[in-house]
Amino acid sequence: MHKIFATHRDQFTISADPSRLDVDTICDFFTRSYWAKGRLRERTERALANSLVFGVYDGEKQIGLARVVTDYAVFAYLCDVFIHEDYRAHGLGKWLIETVHSHPDLQGLRRWTLATRDAHGLYKQFGWDSLGNSEHWMEIFRPFAEEGRD
Ligand SMILES: CC(C)(COP(=O)(O)OP(=O)(O)OC[C@H]1O[C@@H](n2cnc3c(N)ncnc32)[C@H](O)[C@@H]1OP(=O)(O)O)[C@@H](O)C(=O)NCCC(=O)NCCS
């Protein structure tokens, strides 16, 4: 594994250092997301602890996140992509996705997946496409599990 990854642009930093994450801020982002509104804090902490995390910072202040669940060899799942409302539409989201893809430990993977309700146009710019053979895919989906209920 490479040393902890960071990249800078103006006053902004994207860092994969888990110790920099501001869990209060991340939980606050999630209350305004459509996919993780009710996620329990301990679930968020466990998810972050077991993922490759990319925090986006304005100086020291966290203003964005992306999380990658991966085996670092074959497969990666990209999720929890968020830029704070005050910082949107300035290219930070695109820089974040580009940075995730350029991480040295995520090269040569066979497959990346993600799920999105409306941000297809963001990911398409980085080579993503709809599932080619969706009938080959299966899932167990329990949308309320992370809130601690069935
Ligand atoms: C999606 C999000 C991360 C984008 O961050 P951002 O910093 O505003 O994005 P950027 O300024 O880098 O530009 C995003 C690009 O994707 C495009 N795009 C397509 N769908 C989009 C969407 N649903 N939301 C935002 N941008 C979208 C934009 O048009 C733009 O492309 P362009 O510059 O070629 O016009 C941010 O809007 C966000 O946090 N949204 C709420 C959470 C969310 O939907 N996350 C993604 C879940 S999969």
Image (tube, grey):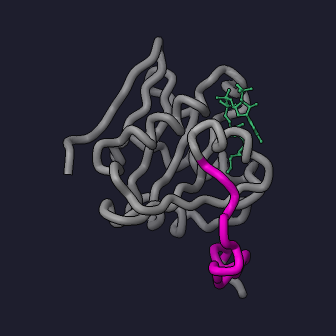
Asked whether residue 135 appears in the rendered view, the answer is yes
Whether 141 is drawn above or below 59: the answer is below
Residue 54: percent from left, percent from top: 44, 43
User: 44 or 133, which is in the foreground?
Assistant: 133
Residue 35 on image: x %, y %: 72, 60
> Taking the image as drawn, is residue 45 in sight?
no
- Which residue extends farthest front? 132
> Is residue 131 found left or right of 47 in the rendered image?
right
Residue 17 lies left or right of residue 79; in this view the side is left
Q: Residue 139 in the image: x percent, y percent?
A: 64, 81
The residue that appears at 53% across and 39% down in the rendered structure is 97
Question: Does the magenta portion include 133?
Answer: yes
Q: Is residue 108 left or right of residue 90?
A: left
Q: Which residues are magenta?
A: 128-147
Which residue, as the protein is rendered here, is positioned at the far bottom?
Answer: 150
| 24 is higher (above) or lower (below) than 57 | below
- Residue 62 versus residue 139: which sits nearer the camera? 139
Task: Specify whether residue 23 is painted magenta.
Answer: no
**What is the chief secondary structure element of the magenta stretch?**
loop
Quarter of the rendered structure image containing ligand 1: top right
Question: In the figure, residue 124 lies in which quadrant?
Answer: top right
Across and down, in percent, residue 28 comes to: 65, 47
Question: Which residue is at 20% across, 45% downward?
Answer: 2
